[in-house]
Amino acid sequence: MYSHVVKTVDGHTAGEPLRIIADGIPQLPGSTMLERRRHAIQHINEFRTILMWEPRGHRDMYGAILTPPATDDGDVGVLFMHNDGFSTMCGHGIIALASLGPGEGLVPLDWSNPLIRFDTPAGRVVARVRHENRRIEDIAFCNVPSFVVDVDASVHVPGLGDVRYDLAFGGAFYAYVDAASVGLELEADQSQRIVDVSMSIKRELIERNCLGEGVLGDELDFLYGVILTGPAHGEAHSRNVCVFADGEVDRSPTGTGVSGRIAIHHHRGEVGLGEHIRIESILGTTFDVAAVEDLTVDDRDAVVPEVTGMAYLTGRHEFVVDPMDPLGTGFLLGG
């Protein structure tokens, strides 16, 4: 009767949704997560649009596909997806998977040694589950090595003039821009203006090839988003608002985004090794982040960020696609 039946577990991390596919999609071939990501892009993209786009999702939906590990010592592989494709890494997604996955039988966990080794397209990410008698209190994950590409760079953006930005990698590449410098306040009721300005900056940086000759390789070397920074509204270090993919606004402080932030602060000598800072989102929700290790990646100074947060279950769903439905594979308005 139905062409597809897909079961999901849904949750949110600091307000940002994650739809975890529990059953109903084909297995992804490939010996590495980048190979599996490539296969997903080429062969199962319709599952992404079915689950991320309307009428089952929305422009700001986010999802995860679990796979067997791609390494001998890994626990689980994961691909992340959004309104415009498949990500290379996602911090809020790691927190959600570590928070919700064990209880839902989707992610293995030894409660006596509560580490989960995730294989992602960007590399190994290790989450520690802090719990009291198996009641999870929070998740701290050590991200892939994160590093600065450029600081105090400038790009001319029509309508905005010369925009100063920093460029860093935290599992994905982001341009970091002071919100006040482009006339923005990081308030929820300004979200459309935030999207418009951020996407203008992103398009100009992509047009000008801000990553130059490449940094990590073709499949990782793309500008994922623009992160606007500003003063905290609560008792935090600062506020982060990330606009990524095709104009999605992250409701959380962005796990890969705060990883790039801590790399920048550490590079500037503003935050010491092991020093935690708290960064809030457009909603006022927070992640804690610290640089816990110095290392070198391809002759670049880098740090290992540790990001701490928590996620919560919102539902379990069974989605179907009626083969007679002309909108069955999904749609988006605008953009």
Image (tube, rainbow, N blue to C red):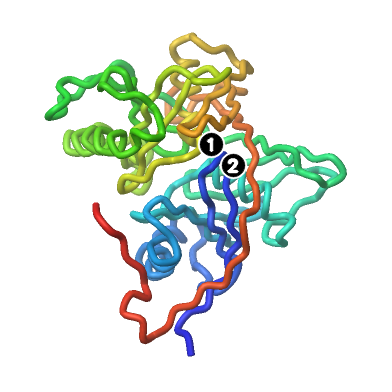
Nearest to the observer: residue 202 or residue 173: 202
The residue labelled by disc 2 is: 125
Q: Residue at x 58, y 26 (%)?
A: 289
Viewer-proximal residue among 163 and 219: 163
- Relative to 322, does residue 215 appear above or below in the rendering? above
Residue 82 seen in the current view: yes
Quadrant of residue 316 in the image?
bottom right
Of the two numbered discs 1 and 2 on the same chain, state the one appearing first in sequence: 2
Categorize mark 1 by other alpha carbons within 10 Å: few (<14), some (14-19), many (20+): many
Quadrant hosting residue 223:
top left
Determine which of the numbered discs, if any, sits on residue 144 in the image.
1
- Outermost residue on the left side: it is 158
Q: Do we see residue 149 in this rendering?
A: no
Residue 98 picture location, percent across and down: 66, 47
Direction from residue 9 to residue 266 in the image, left or right: left
Q: Residue furthest bottom?
A: 1
* Residue 10 in picture, x, y percent from top left: 58, 57
User: In the structure shown, which secondary structural element does the residue marked by tag 1 occupy?
Assistant: loop
Q: Amino acid at mark 2?
A: Val
Task: Give yes or no for contact between labels 1 and 2 (Cβ–Cβ under 8 Å).
Answer: yes
**What's the amino acid at mark 1?**
Val
Q: Which residue is at the front of the view, 285 or 310? A: 285
Secondary structure of the residue carrying numbered label 2: strand
Q: Label 1, label 2: how many angstroms apart (C-alpha)?
A: 6 Å
User: Which residue does the image show at 63% across and 32% down from the upper left?
Assistant: 308
**Horizontal and vertical percent position of residue 9:** 61, 61
Mark 2 is surrounded, within 10 Å at the Cα level, by few (under 14), some (14 to 19) or many (20 or more) other residues, namely: many
What residue appears at the point 33 percent right and 41 percent down from the top-left corner?
221
The label number, if any, that marks residue 8 in the structure image: none
